[in-house]
Amino acid sequence: MEAVVALLEGLPLQPEEGDGGDLMEAKSQLFLKYFTLFMNLLNDCSEGEDDKQSEGRKRSNTNSLTSLRNCTVQAMSNLLSANIDSGLMHSIGLGYHKDLQTRATFMEVLTKILQQGTEFDTLAETVLNDRFERLVELVTMMGDRGELPIAMALASVVPSSQMDELARVFVTLFDAKHLLYQLLWNMFSKEVEVADCMQTLFRGNSLASKIMAFCFKVYGTNYLHALLEPLVKDMLTPEKQNINFEVDPARLEQGDIIEDNRKNLIILTQRFFNAITSSADKFPPQLRSVCHCLYQVVSQRFPQHSVGAVGSAVFLRFINPALVSPVEYGILEQQPPSKVKRGLMLMSKVMQNIANHVPFTKQQHMRVFNDFLKTNFESGRKFFVEIASDCQTIDSNNHSLSFISDANVLALHRLLWNNQEKIGEYLSSSRDHRAVGRRPFDKMATLLAYLGPPEHSRINADAQWSSMNMTSTKFEEFMTKHNAHEKEEFKQIQQLNIFYQAGTSKSGNPVFYYIARRYKCGQINGDLLMYHVLLTLKPYYTKPFELVLDFTHVGVDNRFKTDFLSKWFVVFPKFAFQNVYAAYIYNCNTWLREFTKYHELILNCLKGNRKLYFIDQPNKLNDYIDADLQALPGATLSIDEDVKVFNSALKLSHRDTKVAIKLGTGALQITANEKSKVLGQPVLLNDIYYASEIEEVCLVDDNQFTLTIANAPMPLSFIHNDCDAIVQQIVHIRTRWELSQPDLVQVHPKIRPKDVPGTLLNMALVNLGSSDPSLRSAAYNLLCALTSTFNLRIEGQLLDTSGLCIPANNTIFIVSISKTLAANEAHLTLEFLEECISGFRKSSIELKHLCLEYMTPWLPNLTKFCKHSDESKRSKVAAILDKLIMMTIEEKEMYPSIQAKIWGNIGQVGDLVDAVLDSFIKTSATGGLGSQKAEVMADTAVALASANVQLVSSKVIERMCKLIDKTCMSPTPTLEQHLMWDDIAILARYLLMLSFNNCLDVANNLPYLFHIVILMVSTGPLSLRASIHGLVINIIHSLCTCTQLNFREETKNVLRLSLTEFSLPKFYLLFGISKVKSAAVTAFRSSYRDRSVSHSPQQCEVMPLSSLEVIVDALLEIMEACMKDIPECQWLEKWTDLAKRFAFQYNPALQPRAMVALGCISKGTTNTQVKQLLRILSKALDTFSDIILIDSIVMCLTRLQPQLPLDSPLHKALFWVAVAVLQLDDITLYSSGTALLEQNILTLDEMGLFEDKSPETLFMEIREPLEWHFKQMDHSVGLGFKSDFNFALVGHLIKGFRHPHQDTVARTIRILNKILVIVAKSKKCDKFDVTTDSVAYLAALLSVSEEVRSRCRMKHILPPGTPESAPSGDPFGSDASQASIIPASAPSPIPPRLPPKKSKRHKHMMELSPPNVKTQRSLDSALDQQRLLSEPDKTNFKQPRSLDLGHSVPKSHSSSDLVQRAGSIPATAPEPISSSTPSDIEKNEDARKKRKVSTIAENSVLLDEEVLTDYQTQALLLTVLATLVRHTPDETECRVLYEYLAEASVVFPKVFPIVHSLLDTKINSVLSISQDQATLNAVQNIIQNVISCEDAATQQQISNLQSLGFGGLWRFAGPFTKSPNSTPHSDNAELFVKFLEALLETVLPGDEYDSSSPMPSLIGMAATNLNLSSSMSSLSISSLHSPTEQEQAEMAATTGGRMRHGSASQVPKQRSLGGSFKRKSSKQKGGRQNHT
């Protein structure tokens, strides 16, 4: 072990190249192998010490074991110190090993490597580059005398074939280091030293010559081009290119004159030579340095030839080669003519002699130029002296690192690696370098050992590709097109070294290696491998090359599938196959033989091929490739090392074969003695099995054994005379392999140099708290070494001492050390905390508590990095927070301690809260709402807030508000559908958790909290709804218990009452949790199942805005109560601002809620704000798709109107807005429309506007500027305010009686009563006085108000008697012709009216009786008036369909049936309205005034022909009564209405037929099913009086309602249309939009925006965001339903029809709206579909 200790000191491990191709991984495995071996030895020492102590052995034995243990620890330290890069990350986990003794040992190892001064820089990610840089520095290192020991040694031993590459590497690297002159000096000096004479200097292929040539090529190319290109191209001009320069008589052509040729050559040479000698000032500085160095070196040995040496070198190596080969040097693009080429050749000869300063002597024909030479010797010499003069060093910026590249550095690495032994021998033997010693070589050897063997030279795809022909195969084109060479998978294949080029063969051909076992079928993309092979071969396969196919241990996992094998022969170029000089198949085995047999057809072309050579022994490959140049993997070669061979064995099978069994250190070989045929050639098969594959070996008897191999179909059986030795050797191989396998040590994340102090510090601190005394001592010593090595400022508290007794309870000491280091060495924070968290999971409960204690002082330091400019540090802070979060979630036993120690302390650091919340929300979102992660994070937020309530609460609330704000950027119909819903819901849970005990700081955040509650209430799953309810409860509770706020007892009582109120079932219903027993329990019963993208229908119910209104009012009451006790409190203003921001911003999910809240909480408003609301309303109506938004705007307007300025013109305008809302015929909007109407009337009444003006006068005034729009709206619904304001308003209101919600019904009754009072006030009379203004409201209230019925009596009473007493032929008795109604005021009956003759028109009217549609009664006949205020019956009524007057319909009862039921008493036809004259109307008005009753005590007669004298009022009154009876399901109301209608048939006999069609269906139903005698009596009287009237001109009367402008009264007042997208809805909405636009321009012209308002307006948003368009652009011609020209309007008024834009022919289908009528053309067209 002492020898091993010495051996391992500074020894980097060098693994054999693994099949995986990852050298670092192979090195790590080798480290683990030895480290595990030493750990096992230590365990043996410990066990031996225990045994000997128990047996009482001698002390000397114990001492030897102690010495062995110490040596082993030292060996481990040396091993780790020398291989810190691959070893530390694999061994660091031992510091937390479950065995305390192992921990203590590893502490000692760490302490020793720190004491040894181990360099941790090798852990850096840039370590490889750093090592290469050091290698370059070592090669370029100069000695004291300027020598270059390593460079010169390499230059002396490198083979001549590699000199060109070495010259390139040397020049580029030395030039980059600004040491080119020193390199040249050393190289030239050596060249001059070994030269025999001046004539041989630089004439051979020495390295100095190649370096000089490379310098000329690299640095002189531009100079040559600029100098020679103009001269040479001048020779190619037409007039000169035929000039002859031949001076050799033997080569003269016929007719050539040699003297002329000589002159031509002299002229040419002189011109070129003059140009060259005059360019000295342009000579490149690097080449000046070369020439100067050459001049200096040569002058030392050959002083008289120094200038000549420079000239000779310049022309021989630089200028003349360019003249002789101008194309190769880029001077010309194509070869010059032969005469020009010959001239250049002869000229270069002449100039070379001038440079050499030597005349011609040998060539007779050249001697004639000697005189010319002599004349130029001097000018040449001056030029050479000038360029050889010393020049100033050029600026490093011009060429620093200009030629340094990975290729040069890797080439240097390869050259040094391959020649390192020769370099060592050279440095040891060379007398010139002995003085330098071996120190540089040792450094180089160490560096090379760390770097490992060089990678096989690969072809750089990018560099080669640009200069290659890419069209060789379609496969290459395809792969290139898809950038295959840039894919990560392709780069991984390159790193696996499956195919590579290395060295040359003895034939001089490049050799390529294919390592078959490295290809894994199914794991590696075959096409990419093929592409890699083609790219690697491409620069070579146009010339002969050789292949080495290594099939060592190849098997089924490494096979090419049949289709892929065939593909090779298709894709591979044919000429490449032809250029394969030889293919060497190494280690062919049995599987390969079977593979070739199976694919014999595909491989048939290779059968018997003479280029195939099967290599069955390693030394046979030496016959073809030199051993030094072979590049087989180390794993292949190691199989044949230290092999023990057992010959003459017999392998038993179906055919017994003789084999040799070879047992190596890690593998078993079974080599056949007899050759088998493979691809037609005899081969010795060699099957190889690794030690890891050997599962079992059994000795059957002395001569036989079996071997079980993993994945083999059956055991192998062998016979041999020495079976026992073979089996023992196999067992040894297997055992050795098992021992070399490391324990499953958890690999630590990659450690960098800066990680080391923090990592080891945590290891020392946590182990200081151990229960084992030796471990505590080892940890203390490690802490001492750590502080010393890294200069940690610990203020002298530590001293490394042996034998120190450290108590187990030293927590205070550990924490104090941690605090000191946290304060002094804050830069270690990130690495230390990361290691703390990593070690925390591996520690016991006791040490986990200790870890939390000493972690705490470091947490505040995180603020220094969370806002750091370095992104990596910020991301590391986030990673640490994420790890702390996961620790919180996973460490359930430590949960309370982690909450208190970690998060409680982090919460105190304000700068960290944002980053922490980011991590919390991200973690919660990954789990989802209701998950364990989300709930733990919400809990942890409470711990976070415990130390800083104000900060944390404000951050959480701010984040919630920002998230909700962001939903406006990409709005969705509901909040649950938004992408941010999960984050919003999770933060809502955070708010719930923080809301207890005022952790939300309600004093500062109440407006924000109420705002969030309003937007979130009744959304999401049940648990979230319960959470919002719980949040409200906790907020109110915090207000009660908050110490910041001092409330009066009265305010506290309000808060207590609110707590009670919010816990009532009523509020459970409002919050959407009506089925929950306890909201608090439900809020905390959330689970991951609660999270779903699509909620159940119950959960997706849209919250009614009326419920939201109640909640807002309740919260407002709380806020206002509290504000009374807080001076200058701005809560309400802030809440109002928040509501405004969302109310005026498009967001379907939240805008309606904000609208309602704004209306409820606003304490003032402006015309501008209301106008903005009307603009938004207009846009919403334009599409009429968001009913909720429209409803919310109307509700907001309702709340805001009382706050408008008194002089605002909008007060009166809002009346018509409310009426327009009612016209939309939507159940939801009707309710809010009546609310707006009621508020409007009350507001105007309080303002006293009805004192002098009636409602009709007041409201009709504002219509005048907009009459055109109002006329269209009136026409659309068939209710004409211009004709009769009061009846039109009643027509809108009596629809409210049919509303399903009782509060709307009650509100309708209130409005009617209120208007009745206002009308009476304006007329200065009692409200029950019957006047033309009040009769409409009295009639509407008749069926629902007992008071109206009692004060507005009937003029006549029904006679006693029942129809049952009459004979069957005359159901009403023999007095049927007599008067059927007796006046109440007179004892005698009214004289009977004579029946007129029946007309055809009357007969036709009787045939048009509507169908008998049965209706369900919803209320019991005994239901009294008080039931109106109770909950309505839930039964769905099937109301009778209203029919258009005058349209043909199917008959259900013939006229004869009706006569048989009711008798035949015709009625007198009323006079047409056109017969009235103005004078008649005035008389009637006077009579009405005289008739008017002025005292309250006296009852009025509702149906008084003396008061209601005009035909229009009578007709409208009867229509209202008929409409009410037609649609009411209540029997009591029916009875009352029929009684009054019966009287009307007597009082207004001329008008009554106008309502006959309305009553026909209802009367048939009553006669069929009614049991109420009073109702039947009234109905029978109606029938008698109708029949008794004359039928003349009846059909004319039927159209009178339309001519009066009330054709839609009976229809509009009926049931609500269920579909909001029906034509009447969309048409009315379109008219509403036009009306609003005109209203805003008329009432409030000018800018509708408030420049001081910070809220964005919906109007300002892009139409694409709103998905709304202008009314005109979004309407087709067929949807326009209002006349736009005066003629069309008049025609509509005359005919009762509605004209559209364009002619009638443009409209294929006319819709009937608001008062249908029969067109004259209907008969010809066969009738039209009835449309209600």
Image (cartoon, rainbow, N blue to C red):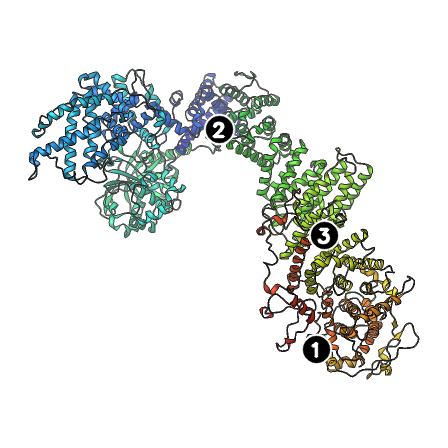
Could you say which quadrant of the image residue 308 lies in? top left
Could you say which quadrant of the image residue 1519 lies in? bottom right
Q: Which residue is mark 2?
A: 92
- Camera-nearest label, 2 or 1: 1
Give whichever of 387, 297 is nearer the camera: 387
Give the percent coordinates (x, y) of residue 1292. 74, 62
Number of other residues with Cα within 10 Å of mark 3, as a class: few under 14, some 14 to 19, many 20 or more: many
Query: Which quadrant holds the C terminus?
Result: bottom right
- Camera-nearest label, 2 or 3: 3
Number of other residues with Cα within 10 Å of mark 2, as a class: few under 14, some 14 to 19, many 20 or more: many
Measured in 3D between alpha carbons, the distance from the residue under mark 1 to the one under mark 3, in whole angstroms, is: 46 Å
Q: Secondary structure at mark 2?
A: helix
Number of other residues with Cα within 10 Å of mark 1, as a class: few under 14, some 14 to 19, many 20 or more: some
Of the residues under marks 2 and 1, which one precedes in the sequence? 2
Measured in 3D between alpha carbons, the distance from the residue under mark 2 to the one under mark 3, in whole angstroms, is: 70 Å
Q: Is residue 60 visible to the viewer in this orientation of the structure?
A: yes
Give whichever of 7, 474 is nearer the camera: 474
Measured in 3D between alpha carbons, the distance from the residue under mark 2 to the one under mark 1, in whole angstroms, is: 100 Å
Q: Is residue 677 visible to the viewer in this orientation of the structure?
A: no
Q: Which residue is mark 1?
A: 1451
From the viewer's perspective, is 962 left or right of 67? right
Q: Hey, what amino acid is under mark 3? A: Met
Q: Which residue is mark 3?
A: 1195
- Camera-nearest label, 1 or 3: 3
> Are the residues tagged 2 and 3 within 8 Å (C-beta)?
no
From the viewer's perspective, is 1071 left or right of 1491? left
Q: Hey, what amino acid is under mark 2? A: Ile
